[in-house]
Image: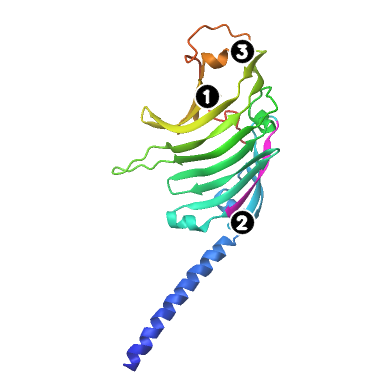
Amino acid sequence: MAQVSASSHKRPRKLWWLFGFILFALFALLQMPASWLLEKYAPNNPYVQHVSGNLWQGSAIWQLPLSAKPLTGAANWSWQPWQLFLGKLGAEVDITTEQTRLNGQIKLGTSAWQIDDMSGKIAPETLASVVDWQLPNTPIQVNAVSLKRQTGSDSDSNKKSSGFSEAEGQLTWVGGEVGYPSGGKVFYITMPAMRAELSTEQKNDKNLLHVNLLNNQDKRLGDLYVDGDNMLDVSLTQRLLENMPEYKGQAPQDTPVVSVRQPLLAGLGTR
């Protein structure tokens, strides 16, 4: 009986040692420098610079060469360990550039990434770095935006198509006069106050992000669609184009009169 009792006391002790080793390994991983991890898994990344901190908490300077003047900002993150129980890596992030401020959660899974509860504002200076237009000095407000995008996995028994599987939230803008160059001439349009409602839609077996543009009276101004190949489809209605002094078209107000298809962030280059 004494031998049985002694062996029963040793087994739990071994389990505690194993549990302690796993905790030690986890915390050692979390304390690894974030700069080392970036260099190992994303070497020569032209968009991320000056990384500090570790996997648990850190910051980085990022840069996107969208135009002649690159868009530069900072990102801070704080790891959310409970996301591991859902099979994801998750972090609370703060993104800043000039007067732009965004805060939310980013989660990475084996076949998808998602953004949850992203809120803040996008400053007009940031917008001017993305498009070469004359823009009003008014920010875009980002209100509880959530997106989930499947990266896709090919299997005979389980095939997931890439694209956006979830989307909600809205963007709001008070508008103002916009001047955009085309054919050597600048065209002006007075953009009304509007909001963009986010949702998902399936077309031609593709899961699309749908951005529905509405005015303050909930009247349709246009639609934006983004597919899994990062192609952007823009459709603008007669109601919106009536705000352009030089536009002379005649059609019912809900009729799409302008349709454009182009790569999303077409100005993004590499160094």
Q: Looking at the picture, which amino acid does disc 3 mark? A: Met
Residue visible at 51% across and 58% down?
81
Decide: few, some or many residues near mark 1? Use Cα within 10 Å; few <14, some 14-19, many ≥20.
Answer: many
Q: Nearer the viewer, residue 138 or 82?
A: 138
Q: CA distance from mark 2 to mark 1?
A: 39 Å
Marks 2 and 1: which is nearer the front?
1
Q: Looking at the picture, which amino acid does disc 1 mark? A: Leu
- From the image, tell me which residue sits under label 1: 214
Q: Is residue 229 visible?
A: no
The quarter of the image holding the N terminus is bottom left
What secondary structure predominates along the stretch shown in magenta?
strand
Percent position of residue 80, x then y = 53, 55
Q: Secondary structure at mark 1?
A: strand
Residue 68 in the figure: left or right of residue 240:
right
Residue 147, compared with residue 248, is above or below; it is: below
Percent position of residue 240, x then y = 56, 17
Residue visible at 28% across and 44% down?
157
Residue 77 in the figure: left or right of residue 90:
right
The quarter of the image holding the C terminus is top right
